[in-house]
Image: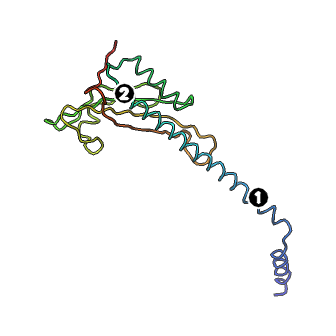
Amino acid sequence: MFFLRPIKSWLDSFRSDERGSVTVEAAITLPLLFWAIAASYEFFEIHRYNSARDKATYTIADMFSRELQSVTPTYMNSAKTVFDTIANDNGTNSVRVTIVKYDSDEDEYSVKWSQVRGSADLSPMETSEVSTAHDTLPAMADGEELIIVDSSSTYPPVFDVGFNDNVVVTTRVMTSPRFAPQINWSNS
């Protein structure tokens, strides 16, 4: 027991000693504070990034819904330029416009045409992807067309706060043609 008294005395004095506690607290809390600030910035920035893409996708869908003439490759390229301008960055963006038609006799959807512009991971939509997609596509009348605009962008995080290296932000907007019963594609 005699040899435990100095250790107990030393532990009691160590516990009641307050010298250096601010330094220890700062060493523990500052990295957490810096991480919290960086994470808050990243969460805000990814939501801003997503919001800009939502607005750009809605704009492209609205452009196509008002179209009275056949859509051409030049129009598609211009739509991609509009998307990039609204998104306001030099990121990896891709836009896909698909016209889907409904056949009530077969109770199936079919892709009339689908075009992609950009360098992200979108590819033209195939009829097999939508033929029985009743749970994701709206109810439509026989012969009615639907415009589906998909966008895909890659968000590069500024800080390493636990996100993947590149976060893929996707948006899908569906609308009907407004002034014409159908939207046609023309290669000329």
Q: Is 186 placed above or below 26 here?
A: above
Q: Is 25 placed above or below 186 here?
A: below
Quarter-of-image position of residue 140: top left
The spot of residue 71 in percent (x, y) is 34, 20
**For this rendering, which residue is in front, 174 or 39?**
174
**For this rendering, which residue is in front, 10 or 45?**
45
Type of amino acid at the residue the image marks with label 2: Phe
Q: Is 105 placed above or below 113 here?
A: below
Type of amino acid at the residue the image marks with label 1: Ala
The reply, left or right, for residue 123 in relation to residue 182 is right
| Residue assigned mark 1 | 27
The reply, left or right, for residue 83 in relation to residue 98 is right
From mark 2 to mark 1, how far is it between C-alphas? 57 Å
Q: Which mark is residue 65?
A: none
Residue at image position (32%, 22%) is 68
Residue at image position (55%, 43%) is 46
| Residue assigned mark 2 | 64
**For this rendering, which residue is in front, 163 or 138?**
138
The spot of residue 60 in percent (x, y) is 42, 30
